[in-house]
Image (cartoon, grey):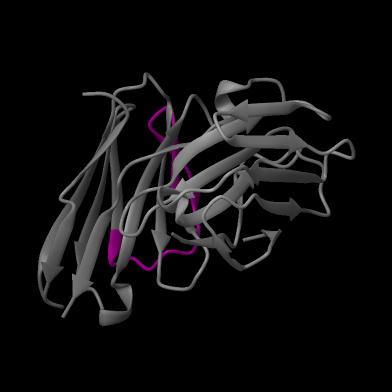
Amino acid sequence: GQQLNQSPQSMFIQEGEDVSMNCTSSSIFNTWLWYKQDPGEGPVLLIALYKAGELTSNGRLTAQFGTTRKDSFLNISASIPSDVGIYFCAGPPYNFNKFYFGSGTKLNVKP
Amino acid sequence: ETGVTQTPRHLVMGMTNKKSLKCEQHLGHNAMYWYKQSAKKPLELMFVYNFKEQTENNSVPSRFSPECPNSSHLFLHLHTLQPEDSALYLCASSQETPSGGRRGANVLTFGAGSRLTVL
């Protein structure tokens, strides 16, 4: 199915650093979702965004729904080793009744 | 129990076996999904059920057979699988299939997955 363009594919950072990742699409989205997946586990929802321009935080995580409705950003501040995992963006495009997913950003944090 | 529960978490089967994966959601949702996640590949949608009716079969081979007896339970029956079917199978649910106006319909909750190995 259609995939969202998610970047970067992977990141290697030092503990304490801030991280940014983003997703773009050629379609307008109603909702942007950000998930984290640990190895061998299912994705866990981190943040859901529902309208253009919305900025939402969940602890050290902050995500934004782009004003064009075609993109979204996730920032992690002051990273810690347990932030390691794969982060996915997802959402249903406007007038589509299915979810599309980014290919994931693999985050590695060096203590 | 809360959320979406999948059993078994790990399954090893031979190509001639018949087994089933089970998913149960305790969220009061009406849409349930099966996804396949292979190593280094994006999530692949397999099946969607909305209010117990199958609304999507994403060209899945017939050796995978879904069953949705009610809105809370979803099964994936497996028979004569191939080694390339080895993957993490994820069940998910949402209030309904996505729609423009309903926020709850646009949020997907996943189970922990069933790791399948076909020998």
Percent position of residue A25, x then y: 78, 53
Residue B98 visible in the picture: no
Which residue does the image show at 22% across and 55% down from the upper left? B77
Measured as percent of width and height from the top left, residue B95 is found at 49, 24
Instruction: Identify whether A8 is placed above or below A30.
Output: below
Q: Where is residue A61 in the image (x, y as percent from the top left)?
A: 59, 37
Q: In this view, does A41 lie above or below A31?
A: below
- Quarter of the image where the N terminus of chain A is located: bottom right
Horizontal arrangement in the rendering, residue B77 relative to residue B104 (left or right): left
Image-quadrant location for residue A57? top right
Q: Which residue is drawn at 42% across and 64% down?
A: B60
- Which residue is the extreme one toward the right? A68
Q: In this view, does A103 lie to the left or right of B110?
A: right
Q: Would residue A44 appear left or right of B8 to someone viewing this image?
A: right
Q: Total of numbered circles in the picture?
A: 0
Residue at position x 52%, y 36% from top? A46
In the picture shown, does residue B36 fall above or below B38?
above
Q: Nearer the viewer, residue A24 or B80?
A: A24
Foreground residue among B65 and B34: B34
- Horizontal and vertical percent for residue A40? 30, 58
Q: Nearer the viewer, residue A17 or A20?
A: A17
Q: Which residue is drawn at 32% across and 79% down?
A: B84
Does residue B94 belong to the magenta stretch?
no
Q: In this view, does B88 lie to the left or right of B79?
A: right
Is residue B114 something that shows in the picture? yes
Which quadrant of the figure contains the C terminus of chain A? Answer: bottom left
Residue extent of the magenta highlight? B47-64
Q: In which quarter of the image is residue B85?
A: bottom left
